[in-house]
Image: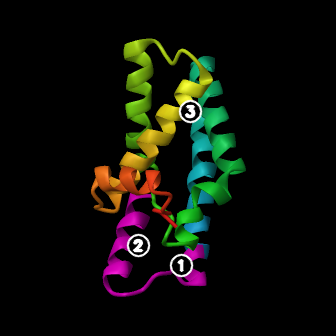
């Protein structure tokens, strides 16, 4: 999968924003082959605990093949979700430090405010101006 992502970046650098049907078919065949090999190797594991873990993971990867490989069909879809995980980390830290929010409304307000701040920073806009424009009734992120 890392090799596929590397190839995707190379193609993007050369102005191509898609894999050909043949390339997609090859990638999907290799994916299936790896999962088939995993099934064969799983039989050699002596521990039933690890056999069950591997089997659950393999079945989940087979079942969600379309979702796992979606990024090869659409280059606008990121390879991983690290960006979103970094955004959510701040909320998780907040709940760990304070033990959570006193009400669901407070959590919702916190989420809304942080959404405005993070979106403003992402779009390289001044956060204070963005908040001021909201109070003026202007639409910011259409």
List x then y, in percent, for residue 99.
46, 12
List x then y, in percent, for residue 130.
36, 55
Q: Mark 2 or 3 closer to N-term?
A: 2
Whether residue 50 is visible to the viewer of this picture, yes or no, is yes
Residue that mark 2 sits on: 8
Residue that mark 3 sits on: 108
Which quarter of the figure has residue 74?
A: bottom right
Residue that mark 1 sits on: 23
Q: Nearer the viewer, mark 1 or mark 2?
A: 2
Which region shows up in magenta?
1-24
Residue 13 is inside the magenta segment: yes
Give the Cα separation between the discs numbered 1 and 3: 44 Å
* Above/below status of 117 relative to 50: below
Front residue (pair 31, 47): 31
| Element at label 3 | helix
Whether residue 43 is visible to the viewer of this picture, yes or no, is no
| Element at label 2 | helix
Label pair 1/3, CB-CB below 8 angstroms: no
Q: Nearer the viewer, mark 2 or mark 3?
A: 3
């Amino acid at each position: 999968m890392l090799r596929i992502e590397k190839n995707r970046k190379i193609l993007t650098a050369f102005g191509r924003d898609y894999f050909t049907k043949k390339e997609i078919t090859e990638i999907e065949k290799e994916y299936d082959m790896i999962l088939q090999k995993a099934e064969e190797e799983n039989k050699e594991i002596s521990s039933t605990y690890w056999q069950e873990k591997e089997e659950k993971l393999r079945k989940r990867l087979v079942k969600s093949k379309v979702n796992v490989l979606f990024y090869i069909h659409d280059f606008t879809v990121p390879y991983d979700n690290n960006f979103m995980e970094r955004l959510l980390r701040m909320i998780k830290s907040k709940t760990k430090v304070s033990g959570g929010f006193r009400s669901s409304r407070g959590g919702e307000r916190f989420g809304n405010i942080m959404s405005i701040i993070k979106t403003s920073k992402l779009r390289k806009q001044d956060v204070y101006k963005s908040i001021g424009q909201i109070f003026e009734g202007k639409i910011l992120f259409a």
